[in-house]
């Protein structure tokens, strides 16, 4: 979503009215641009890429429980889920990178919005697309497996919601920071390495935090499985934590590690950080 530095306004208006009109005009422009053909294709790409990722993650979790129903803490299942998360996300990011930026995650979209790379209105439509993709993936898994229980993310019994949110915040920070680093066009294209790096950091985080919070890092994945299963316990952990981590990553990269002054960007993956470049 493009960021606009100026608007056509009546400069004779009082300062207070000018500020309100400027904000109103900017939102109006963003809203209009949110319904262009490119924007609509971006929403569809986010829907499909999130569907692919969530189907892989939730499906692999269901498969592990099906094959090892009595294993409550088997490390093999954790490895399987970690690998599925890495491969699923790498694929999801790759196929959508040139269309929508390949976010497949509301936290990633929020982190890029914090850095000024995507407008507020487009962020809302991206979130809606991602949530719908996750819900459909979980619904189809439940339907196609004859009502097999849909697993949800949960924190360990010995942990508090606060501790879980902190851990999810740290995990999501590493993910969003990686997205910024591999998607920065000032460094040139990383090719297929970009999506692979993003998948790897998610897979590693699942292996590290799976026994504690499930290693979500993705509010859409957590919400979709919770909605279809009907279990919303500790759902706030998987929204608050990731959004805080994404905010810190966006601000740190944009204003400390690699600041820039670009004020224009292509639709779907704006600014100089365009999402994974493939």
Image: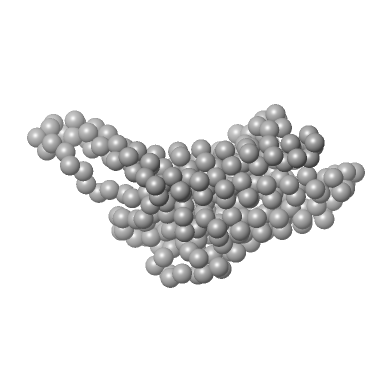
Judge from the rendering whether residue 254 lies leftward or rightward of residue 278; answer left or right. left
Q: Residue furthest left?
A: 12
Residue at image coords 54%, 65%: 194
Quarter of the image for residue 134 reads top right
Residue in the foreground of this view, choosing between 122 and 171: 122
Q: Is residue 69 above or below residue 75?
A: above
Is residue 243 something that shows in the picture? no
Q: Nearer the viewer, residue 33 or 248?
A: 33
Residue drawn at point x = 30 percent, y = 58 percent: 261
Residue farthest to the right? 70
Q: Is residue 261 left or right of residue 194?
A: left
- Residue at 69% x, 50% y is 56
The location of residue 205, given as percent across then percent down, is: 66, 55
Indicate the position of residue 10 as horizontal and vertical percent values.
13, 36
Q: Is residue 183 left or right of residue 142?
A: left
Residue 53: x, y in percent?
63, 50
Q: Nearer the viewer, residue 164 or 226?
A: 226
Residue 33 visible in image: yes
């Amino acid at each position: 979503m493009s960021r606009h530095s100026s608007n056509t306004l009546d400069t004779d208006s009082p300062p207070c009215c000018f500020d309100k009109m400027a904000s109103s005009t900017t939102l109006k422009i963003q809203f209009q641009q949110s319904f262009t053909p490119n924007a609509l294709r971006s929403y569809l790409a986010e829907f499909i890429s999130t569907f692919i990722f969530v189907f892989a993650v939730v499906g692999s979790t269901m498969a592990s429980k099906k094959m090892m129903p009595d294993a409550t803490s088997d490390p093999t299942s954790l490895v399987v889920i970690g690998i599925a998360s890495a491969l699923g996300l790498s694929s999801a990011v790759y196929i959508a990178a040139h269309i929508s930026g390949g976010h497949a995650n509301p936290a990633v979209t929020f982190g890029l919005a914090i850095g000024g790379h995507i407008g507020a209105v487009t962020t809302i439509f991206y979130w809606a697309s991602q949530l719908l993709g996750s819900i459909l993936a979980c619904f189809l898994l439940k339907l196609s497996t004859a009502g097999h229980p849909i697993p949800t993310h949960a924190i360990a019994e010995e942990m508090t919601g606060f501790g879980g949110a902190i851990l999810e915040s740290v995990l999501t920070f590493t993910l969003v920071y990686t997205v910024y680093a591999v998607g920065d066009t000032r460094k040139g294209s990383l090719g297929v390495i970009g999506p692979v790096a993003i998948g790897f950091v998610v897979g590693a985080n699942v292996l590290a935090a799976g026994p504690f919070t499930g290693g979500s890092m993705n509010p859409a994945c957590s919400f979709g499985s919770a909605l279809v299963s009907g279990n919303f316990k500790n759902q706030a952990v998987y929204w608050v934590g990731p959004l805080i981590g994404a905010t810190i990553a966006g601000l740190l990269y944009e204003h400390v590690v690699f600041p820039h002054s670009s004020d224009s960007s292509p639709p779907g993956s704006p600014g100089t950080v365009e999402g994974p470049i493939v």
